[in-house]
Image (cartoon, rainbow, N blue to C red):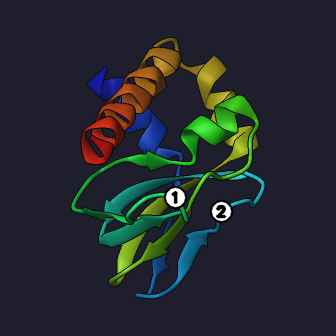
Amino acid sequence: MLETERKILASGIELHFKGGEYLYRKGQEAEFVFYLKDGKFELADERHKPIILDGFRYFLGLEEILSDKQHRYSVKALSNAQVLVFEKSLLHTLLYEYDLAQRYFMLKMCDYMSFQEHVYE
């Protein structure tokens, strides 16, 4: 699984965000998946208290891309940050190119959902 992760992450394009910049906003079409590499981020919607992610290595937007939905919350960098960006078409290619990619992304979604459930308890 580590080899699969290495190959997948090597396919992403590294971008830098300044504090206050949005990765995406609630309601936007999900066209990219973002892997949080470094920095502090805020996930916000109008129904819940904002979630602060600091040092977490997560894929954001993965659920929306895979289910073909709009983003459910806004994500803003609270500090200078680095992310890896994966275009929707690239993500679909990775899912079919690597044998363990589907399992890898499923495990990453489960990790994120577990984190969200813990935060909203």
Residue 79 falls in image quadrant: bottom left
Q: Which residue lies under the disc numbered 2?
A: 26
Residue 71 position in % (x across, y down): 66, 52
Q: For numbered disc 1, what is the local secondary structure?
A: loop
Which quadrant: the C terminus? top left
Q: Which mark is residue 47?
A: 1
Is tag 2's residue or tag 1's residue first in the polypeptide sequence?
A: 2
Residue 73 position in % (x across, y down): 57, 58
Q: Amino acid at mark 2?
A: Lys
* Relative side of 90 to 118, left or right: right
Which quadrant: the N terminus? top left
In this rendering, is residue 72 above or below 110?
below
Residue at image position (35%, 42%) is 116
Residue 45 position in % (x across, y down): 54, 63
* Relative side of 58 to 61, left or right: left
Q: Which mark is residue 114?
A: none
Residue at image position (56%, 40%) is 62
* Relative side of 54 to 67, left or right: left
